[in-house]
Image: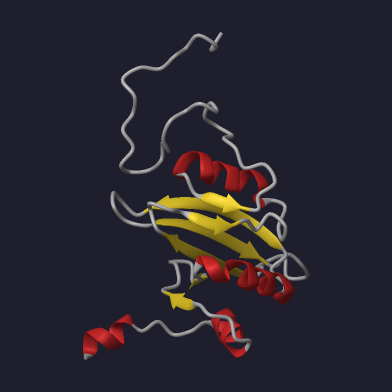
Amino acid sequence: MADEEAKIVPAGQISQWLTENGFDHESLQADVNGIEIIKVSADFLLPTATALYAYGFNCLQFQGGIDLGPGQELVSVYHLIKVGDNVDKPEEVRVKVFLPRDNPVIPSVYWIWRTADWQERESYDMYGIVYEGHPNLKRILMPEDWVGWPLRKDYISPDFYELQDAY
């Protein structure tokens, strides 16, 4: 019983607001800096992201991918901040979407925060996370004909690299 109580994460201010307004999510343990982390399913990312934007999170400071390990899920992470009057310590929240490794498809937040453009492309290029609705989802770091997703933990590097165009 004590182990179950230890796993319960108290809802933060943003999680409480989302719950009051009917948005399906889960509170995760805050990070070491006390930043609230919210887990959202891919199906509810766009409604939740739109609500957070309306709540005042007008800046997508960071979007990236995480690989939890071979055979495990991929994660798309969004770090949002409120840019406004409180420049000394703006309010922050992190949103995580856990995706199946064999079909990591998630809606693009490009139409909410334009800064997601290259960040989502990088997550696609390195992890193979597909951002549906992105206006130009193609490789940004690797050549277009590259096979595989280099930052996945089960990625096997090729034995050779073509350097013909590297001059």
Q: Give the quarter of the figure containing the N terminus.
A: bottom left
**Residue at 41% of width from left, 35% of height from top?**
148
- Residue 162 sits in which quadrant? top left
Q: Is residue 62 above or below residue 12?
A: above
Q: Is residue 80 above or below residue 116?
A: below
Q: How many marks?
A: 0
Residue 155: image location, x then y, percent: 33, 37
Residue 103: image location, x then y, percent: 43, 53
How is the rendered protein coloured? Answer: secondary structure
Of 102 and 75, nearer the camera is 102
Residue 56: image location, x then y, percent: 72, 72
- Residue 74 sits in which quadrant? bottom left
- Residue 80 sits in which quadrant? bottom right
In the displayed orientation, state which residue is furthest to the right.
Answer: 85
Of 94 and 18, nearer the camera is 18
Residue 55 lies left or right of residue 25; in this view the side is right
**Residue at 59% of width from left, 79% of height from top?**
14
Residue 54: image location, x then y, percent: 73, 74
Q: Is residue 37 above or below residue 134?
A: below
Residue 152 lies left or right of residue 114; in this view the side is left
Residue 121 lies left or right of residue 9; in this view the side is right
**Residue at 31% of width from left, 20% of height from top?**
159
Residue 120 lies left or right of residue 111; in this view the side is left
Q: Give the quarter of the figure containing the C terminus.
A: top right
**Residue at 64% of width from left, 72% of height from top?**
47
